[in-house]
Amino acid sequence: MGFLSNTSQNIKVALKYHSFKLASYLADRLPLRFSYSVAKLAGDVVYFGLKKHSANAVSNMRRVLGPDAPWQAVKHTARRSFRNYAKTIVDFFRYPYMEGDDLRVAVPLRYGVEHLLEAYDRGKGVLLVSGHIGNWDLAGAVLMSYGLPVNAVADSFQPERLDDLINGSRERKGMKIIKLDTSSLRGIFTALKKGETVSLMFDRPENANEGVPVQFFGETAYVPAGPGAIALKTGAAVLVGYCMRRPGDKTFYGAVEPAIDYEPYLTGDKQRDIQKITQMIVSSMEDVIRRHPDQWYMFREMWPRTDEHDAEVKQKRFWGGTRDVSVASS
């Protein structure tokens, strides 16, 4: 049994690795318009097939678009977010083959670089915060094009050779990877102490016992304390950055918001200060999401649901289904 189990595991590992290589090869060779068309179809399949995730997306989009938004608009935007996420996966597969010229063509418009350079000149390190929005791999590539040392906090992939393929391609483009594990904080503090840039995503929903409470689109949500706690401990500059898909799917634009001026609001109360910094980060990201709601890929339950909310879910057929509006592709 042990031999069969190990053999089965080895086959799964090999399939995972070679499937990624094949998908990456095809994404690089096939016309991008064709790949995106397939991605949109896949996004629709996931949206209609995985009802829990689509329900979460619609629930989240309800908060983003506001209580006065028509339900069909809410569901249409949530569906577009699945399509755009599938396109982002195509870009993820293409990324190992992309070179400097490809990146310049893909992201011709860039805003706010002066904010990043000013923060870097302070010498205390830069904490560049983003969320599951737009295309984060291209965002990192844009940063590296300015010659700044960039460290990205990233998940590891299994098997190890798949990790070498994915994170290795990022490192070959000049990015330093801080693996998301028990030693990641040490790596973050070391990079910031050197005055380098550390990029991380913060918008993972937490439960009330572990997360920091913030006002997010008018309701209380709980998000990780990490960015706020790191900024408070190190004095690093905190900026919000992102790379967004432009209409037509041909190019992106990258942007860095002005540094968050949190120091005047510090009180000496650690928990209160972390909450304040976190709130300022969330408020900045809220503006970005409001401008590009269909490029926010939050398929988890961002806000705790109430009994009243669940009743509204059932009444409005929140879960997608046959009444979901058919719309033109994004």
Image (cartoon, rainbow, N blue to C red):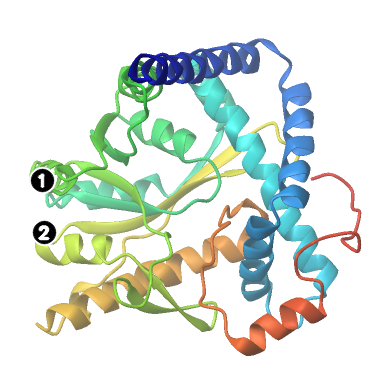
User: Taking the image as drawn, is residue 99 in sight?
Assistant: no
Of pointers 2 and 1, the one earlier in the residue sequence: 1
Residue at 58%, 29% in the rendered image: 91
Expressed as whole percent of the image width and height from the top left, the position of residue 34 reads 78, 22
Neighbourhood count class around disc 1 (C-alpha, 10 Å): few under 14, some 14–19, many 20 upward: few
Expressed as whole percent of the image width and height from the top left, the position of residue 9 reads 41, 21
The quarter of the rendered structure image containing the N terminus is: top left
5 sits to left or right of 23: left
Residue at 51%, 83% in the rendered image: 219
In front: 303, or 280?
303
Q: Mark 2 or mark 1, which is nearer to you?
A: 1
Q: Residue 232 sits in which quadrant?
A: bottom left
Expressed as whole percent of the image width and height from the top left, the position of residue 58 reads 69, 65
View extreme (front): residue: 1
Q: Is residue 73 above or below residue 186?
A: below
**Please, what secondary structure does the residue beneath circle 2 have?**
helix
Q: CA distance from mark 2 to mark 1?
A: 12 Å
Residue at 35%, 23% in the rendered image: 163
In front: 102, or 310?
310
In front: 10, or 277?
10
The quarter of the rendered structure image containing the C terminus is: top right
Expressed as whole percent of the image width and height from the top left, the position of residue 183 reads 14, 43
Q: Is residue 19 above or below residue 63?
A: above
Label 1 belongs to which residue?
Answer: 186
User: Taking the image as drawn, is residue 188 in sight?
Assistant: yes
Numbered-mark total: 2
Residue at 35%, 25% in the rendered image: 167
Label 2 sits on what residue type? Thr
Label 1 sits on what residue type? Arg
Label 2 belongs to which residue?
Answer: 234
Q: Is residue 29 above or below residue 52?
A: above
